Image (tube, rainbow, N blue to C red):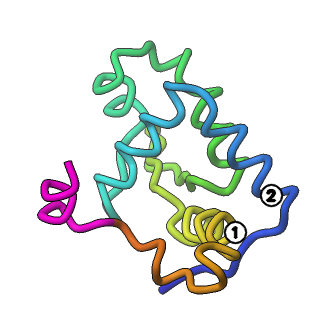
Amino acid sequence: MRGEPIEEGAAVEALAALGHPTRIEAVRQLVGAGDAGLAAGAIARVLDVRENALSPHLARLVQAGLATRRREGRAVRYEADVAGLSGLLDFLLKDCCGGRPELCAPVPSERKEKIA
């Protein structure tokens, strides 16, 4: 299900949050993990970042509406906020392709090979 396009201020905040290599890679890891999400320690290991150095990055993603967190005992588990990510994409593509956003869909991999 697609989210509603977000407002410009929220889009700026989300894009600023994605403007750091650690945060954008964390989002990619969370998207890949799906509904199960990932514990903060697991994200830190995959990204080869100390957990205490990763915490502010994850907090920024949560603040920007791109991730959610929940406490599980002493651990914190993060998930991609699919509605937030979808809303950002909808904002970016709202006026895409002459008002026909379906034209902005990802190019299938077999078509990419033909283009290259």
Residue 78 spot, x, y in % from top left = 47, 49
Circle 1 SS class: helix
- At x 87% / y 56%, what residue is drawn? 9
- Mark sitting earlier along the chain (1/2): 2
Residue type, numbered disc 1: Phe
For residue 86, side relative to residue 6 (left or right): left
The reply to whether callout 1 and callout 2 are in contact (CB within 8 Å) is: yes
- Residue density around tag 1, few if under 14, some if 14–19, many if 20 or more, within 10 Å: some
Residue 43 spot, x, y in % from top left = 37, 32
Is residue 20 magenta-colored? no
Q: From the viewer's perspective, is the residue at label 1 or at label 2 nearer?
A: 1
Nearer to us in this view, 36 or 1:
1
- At x 22% / y 67%, what residue is drawn? 108
For residue 32, side relative to residue 13 (left or right): left
For residue 59, side relative to residue 7 (left or right): left
Residue 10 is labelled as 2
Magenta: main secondary structure: helix
Residue 91 is labelled as 1
**Label 1, label 2: how far apart the Cα atoms are:** 10 Å
Q: Is residue 87 above or below residue 103?
A: above
Q: Which residues are magenta?
A: 107-116
Residue 66 spot, x, y in % from top left = 60, 54
- Residue density around tag 2, few if under 14, some if 14–19, many if 20 or more, within 10 Å: some
Is residue 110 magenta-colored? yes
Nearer to us in this view, 102 or 69:
102
Q: Which quadrant would residue 97 be assigned to in this image?
A: bottom right
Residue 59 spot, x, y in % from top left = 65, 38
Residue type, numbered disc 2: Ala
- At x 29% / y 53%, what residue is drawn? 33
Q: Is residue 58 above or below residue 52?
A: below
Circle 2 SS class: helix
